[in-house]
Amino acid sequence: MSWMFSRIDNMGRFLTTNIEYTINVVLMVYVSVRAAVLDRAQGFRQIFSVISAQIYFTGWQAVPLISVLALAVGSILMLQALSNLTLVGGVEVLGSFMIAILVREVAPLLTAIVVIARSGTAVASEVGTMRVNREIEALEVMGINPLSFIVFPRVVGGLISVLCLSFYFNVIGLIGGYFLTKFFHEIPLGFFLDSLANAFSKEDILVFVLKNSFSGIMIFVVCCYQGMLVKKSPHEVPQVTTQAVVTSVIYVTVFNLAVTALYYLSQLQKLGLV
Amino acid sequence: MEGQVIPIESLRFEDISLWHDGGHPVLKNTTFDFPMGGVIWLKSDEGAGKSTLLNALAGLHNPTSGSYVINDIDVVPMSFEEFLPYRLSIGYSFDYGGLINNRTLRDNLLLPLLFHHLCTPEQAYVRVDEILQRFEITKYAGERPAHVPGRVRKLVVVLRSIVTYPSFLLLDDPSVGLSDDILSNFVSWIDEAREAGRLSTIVVSAFDDKMVRPFDHTIVALEGHQLFVGSQVEKRVANL
């Protein structure tokens, strides 16, 4: 019997630790927004300069990598779809296929992973190093709230960047993918655009905003939170950075999966199948 | 002047318990009135918790129990925003680190003045340039902390604590890494600020009296997780 209790104990410990962590992360979103709103000294110009720097590093500098990824993924998906749909004579559903796979699923997930790899790691190690160098304490001593000065602008900058990057991923994936595919397979542009327009629905906008907003906020809050966990020693910085990547990927993946499951459940409900 | 500043007139620990981050006690159920209006030399054995105590006085480290009373108001339950007017009259110098690494030394000194609009930008630049000239580090003003010698970094941390003209100054090991000439210049600055009525109380945490020797000072000893003023320590030693 003892092995059973031991397993239940371990499961309970795992659950409570993760629930507590999630509560802390969500709380950090609230306290950073609260600090930014209540901070009378921090002017719009100061916040805007950090937000624009964050958009530059996270959004603008990721454009080349996102372009290559989007082109490759868009072309691969279209070639695979065409080779299989042609066999069964269903080329007219190409648009639906691309919207379902690329716009709803692949673009939000890949954009989030690129942002975690490029900027999440940078933010976690930056904040961790600031803790080691006592810059966070120095800000507090000067009466500058680190939550409004460091966390809030990074989260807002990250949110805007992820939304823009994901939109860009979709455009390059669909249009660029089409032009690359034209080397191998002749499809009229008008037919392709019509097919996309017919497949696109207002729920896709909701899915796009939900998935990418969550990723943008959670990646940067988790990375700032992990950075803040550093106590004093530089050896903790790579540890918290690794943990920030793992945790961000888990949050983003689980949320994407949950939204997809709910979306398809609602579609099945509309069709009266559930 | 946009940032509201409340001058610190009295400081009192009431039944306070304070612990290191590492889990060692610094103070246990201590009640203590800090002597105000002079120079206090905070003394203790190495590792007894002088820096943690200074952190608590600056509002950076909350006690585990008890009250930290400033001007007859318990500040422990206060939020960051509520404590801000007190914080703006406190200057704090770290024993190591503490400079913002992605800003130049001049910007580090300007930051608290400009952020809280404690004076006009023109006045802030004049004040900072005067301080840089006085301590002969103008040539490093445009450099970032990583690109200057260690003694300059330490000096800028000390100078940032005085740039806002605080009435209450907390100095953690200020003499470490600074030459005698710079220290004597800093002591002169403190004398001038006290004569001008800008600076009231200074707490120096140090293992030697290099910094406090030029001043008429009171010793506050941290011993056995309690605080004592100098005369009480002598009485305790005499009674042993």
Image (cartoon, grey):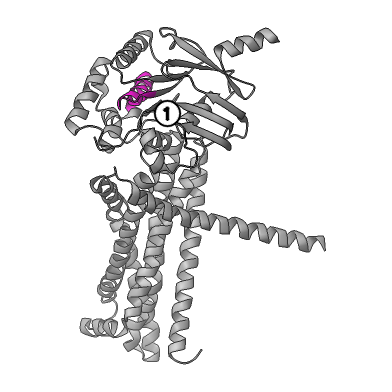
Q: Identify residue for label 1.
A: B97
Tell me which segment is drawn in magenta.
B147-168
Comparing A15 with A187, the one in front is: A15
Q: Main secondary structure of the magenta part?
A: helix
Residue B157 is covered by the magenta coloring: yes
Q: Residue at x 39, y 14 (%)?
A: B178
Across and down, in percent, residue B132 comes to 25, 20
Say if A97 sits above or below A163 in the image. Answer: below
Residue at image location 31% in from the left, 62% down from the top: A165
Judged left or right of residue B113, residue A141 is right
Q: Chain of mark 1?
A: B
Query: Residue A52: x, y in percent?
Result: 26, 50
Residue at x-position 48% and y-position 59%: A249
Label 1: how many Cα within 10 Å (few below 14, some 14–19, many 20+): many
**Residue B232 in sight from this viewpoint:** yes
Residue nearest the viewer, comparing B198 with A167: B198
Identified at 41% across, 66% down, the residue is A109
Image quarter in which the N terminus of chain A is found? bottom right
Farthest-out residue, left: B122
Q: Residue furthest front?
A: B72
Q: Quadrant of residue B139?
A: top left
In-image side of B168 versus B16 (left or right): left
Q: Nearer the viewer, residue A196 or B153?
A: B153
Residue A155 x, y percent position in the rendering: 36, 54
Does the magenta segment cover residue A224? no
Q: How many marks?
A: 1
Q: Residue A253 at x, y = what percent?
A: 48, 65
**Which element type, helix, strand or loop, lies under badge 1?**
loop
